Amino acid sequence: MAKKLLLDKVHVPGIRSYEVYRKEGGYRSVEKAFRLTPAEIVEEVKLSGLRGRGGAGFPTGMKWSFLAKPEGVPRYLVCNADESEPGTFKDRYLMEFIPHLLIEGMIVSSFALGSNVSYIYIRGEYAWITDILESAIAEAKQNGWLGKNILGTGFDCELYVQRGAGAYICGEETALIESLEGKRGNPRIKPPFPAVKGLWDCPTVVNNVETLAAVVPIINEGGEAYSKIGVGKSTGTKLISACGNINKPGIYEIDMTISVEDFIFSDEYCGGIPNGKKLKACIPGGSSVPILPANLLLTTAKGEKRMMNYEGLSDGGFATGSMMGSGGFIVLDEDQCVVRNTMTLARFYHHESCGQCSPCREGTGWMERILKKIESGKGEMKDIDLLWDIQRKIEGNTICPLGDAAAWPVAAAIRHFRDEFEWHVLNPDKCLTENFGLRHYADPIHVTVTA
Amino acid sequence: MADEIKTFKVTIDNITIDVPVGTTVLNAARQIGGDVAPPAMCYYSKLQGSGGKCRTCLVEVAAGSTADPRPMPKLVASCRTTVMDGMIVKNITSEKVKDARAGVVEFLLLNHPLDCPICDQAGECHLQDLGYEHGKAGTRYEFPRRTFEKEDIGPYIQLHMTRCILCYRCTYVADQLTEKRVHGILDRGEHAEISTYISKAVDNEFSGNMIDVCPVGALTDKTFRFKNRVWFTKPVDAHRNCDTPGCCGNTTLWLRGEEVYRVTARKDEWGEVKSYDGKPGWICNTCRFDKKKTSDWTIEGITKVNRHSVISQGKYDGLVMPKETIQKVMGGREPKLLMNIHDESEVNDPKIYLSEINGPAHSRNFEN
Ligand SMILES: Cc1cc2nc3c(=O)[nH]c(=O)nc-3n(C[C@H](O)[C@H](O)[C@H](O)COP(=O)(O)O)c2cc1C
Ligand code: SF4
Ligand code: SF4
Ligand code: FES
């Protein structure tokens, strides 16, 4: 069994309550943190090599050290619990079953960053989790972990939960800040970055739920010890929410030393594909990251086993690789249609675009309509090239990464599954009743050997 | 030395200039002028916070600064990017920019109704200009264009949501010029729309300025609706002693004969409201909608109009020749003309001002 740092206690009965959580060693990291200076905590987080778990994988310690500290201006820590990326549901599990872990991590992080008022911005649809978090916060406050002069240290900290109203775009950190301020959730134009001008124009750090929870084991075990778990720049453990055509969908905490193949087929994790079907494709890091056919998923273009970590999943760049993203692992078996799958994702981004910038506002809907046309057997060959051209003109030309997130899945689907698209165009009737199937997508890849 | 203004050197399309620290790439390019200035559909220098949305002003940064000469990985919105010392920018000399801009123009026109023949903005529409200069003939979009439920926003301003490009300028006008904004953007993505939510009249002494900042025909003057085409009217600069606080009283009257068809603020060469002593020349609704007699005004003379505008249509002088920058962009080389029309034909001699000809022009007007 791999080492668990976040979910090791999640099955202890009653762990959701303060008493049990505390008895199991909870809030130790806060006591320890108060014996350090804020700068020392930031240093531990830097040492740990922790990378943001919200999708971009930016080193957390570095992000914290960028926080501007002008005299007399408050600073804020905001936890991003908007979790709306299709395929991603790890934060939900963590908050629902072990809410005190997030609160503990937020107290330590607030102390390190000098935030006296910190927020959890939670996805509107997670209404019942808001209640869980709020009662956990009340318990923590009753027991002196929040409020004025915490544990006699002179540090004050209040924690508030704010519900979103059901918009994916409010997970983008600057849209989240706008929404938290009570405005329309439009992403801001950067610079300035939140580290300089964030919430109420004050320096702000926005971190994912899992990132902030990971601060607890980092402080408990030390940054260096944490950095020894995992491999290379993928340190610590990562929560993966696995779904799709697998025997055991759910949340797994992995230490990033296993291969993608083991993750899908071993009984410890996904337990293989149900009904004796074969693996066709996978979106390994949430709906925004490139889809890979089975062969490139399990083996890199260099012919090596692909590993379940930041470097492994992105090996080969976008040409032959993908991304760790937010850890939403979506598996497609041989009965799934990539065109239909891509259309579903395109519909999502079309629906969720904020509409501020022209390429994303106009391009996302256009892509969805063309995909719908191809999927319903009315497509023409030129539509495939048109799709490619549209995604190319959105990518990189928008205010926020939602534009890229809408473009990448379409690009990757055409890059790796072009013949499936063409088959739809050439078989307008058949494609309505049958699927293209597995075809060559799991065949071994020819690896050129250079002498 | 305290009041010496610190400047940065920036090179845009091979032309180097010094600009004060804090200048945006777009404003630096406007100082050079001509084709080097990127088109801007959402940025408006007099409206704080505007820009960054339409993406027509994207440029390539080939070198970030002298200190860090690395190129920027993506194209940047020139209206929201400040110049660094030694920055090298490519606008019309960048293939990437041309490609991306053509894409943006296509996106902006995708759902546009193309109802120019019945649109009051035609002739002074920035989207028409943009499409003409950077767009392609024909569209690759084959789906129904989106429509919106019609909304009446009061007696002065006509809203045509299908023409809106969501530049947000009118919301900034409402925020920055009026006490209370009563309209805004509802819904999101493709369905985002300008609305007052409960069909409220947009009624404020300065609301009319939204018409002037709207780059397209989404907000037009209801009192001018379908009355005339702008190129049939004659713009003259005029002023009156207006006692509305904040109104500059300087306007352009759009005349036909003695009749005042429309009153607008005066515009500068970028299509923005002109500034007087650094203050934007916004006008009040009294000047705009209620003073429709020439006797209300002191007329100063004919308005200078950009030559590229159809309003110029050769009926009066006062044309402003656009600045020629191409030779400088090309390092001093003259552009090679395939044929100079004036060598081939005497018609349309550039030295003859059509406006000075009494009545319609005849071939004899061009005989030397
Ligand atoms: C459209 C969009 C949606 C996003 N949604 C989320 C989200 O739901 N949760 C999250 O943690 N980060 C989300 N992000 C990433 C955040 O902008 C930000 O990078 C992240 O919260 C930083 O936290 P981290 O450094 O701990 O990963 C989203 C980004 C984009 C562009
Ligand atoms: S990329 Fe899309 S979601 Fe992001 S700001 Fe632009 S329109 Fe809004
Ligand atoms: S109505 Fe005009 S000014 Fe307002 S957002 Fe639309 S295009 Fe811009
Ligand atoms: S003018 Fe710069 S993005 Fe619109």
Image (cartoon, helix red, strand yellow):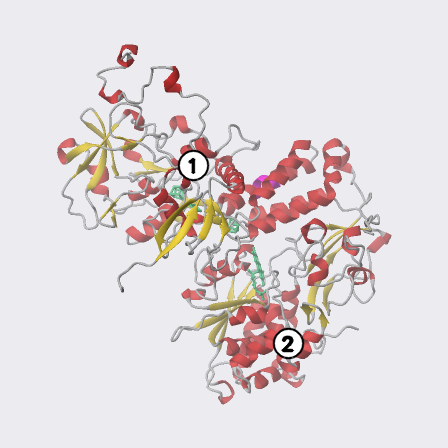
Q: Is mark 1 within 8 Å of ligand 3?
A: yes
Same subunit: marks 2 and 1 = no
Q: Is residue B166 left or right of residue A338?
A: left
Q: Is residue A146 left or right of residue B286?
A: right
Relative height, residue A91 to residue B35 (above, below):
below
Q: Dot 2 lies on which element? A: loop
Of the pair A439 and A270, the residue shown nearer to us: A439
Q: Do we see residue A340 in this rendering?
A: no
Relative height, residue B32 to residue B341 (above, below):
below
Identity of the amino acid at label 2? Arg
The residue sitting at 51% across, 48% down in the picture is: B75
The residue sitting at 41% across, 40% down in the picture is: B36
Q: Is residue B306 left or right of residue A9?
A: left
Q: Specify the subunit that label 2 lies on.
A: A
Circle 2/circle 1 CB separation < 8 Å? no
- The main secondary structure of the magenta stretch is helix
The residue sitting at 27% across, 10% down in the picture is: B364
To which residue does mark 2 refer? A16
**Which label was assigned to residue B163?**
1
Magenta-highlighted residues? A364-368
x and y, in percent, of residue B307 in the image: 32, 30
x and y, in percent, of residue A183 in the image: 43, 58
Distance between mark 2 and mark 1 Cα atoms: 54 Å
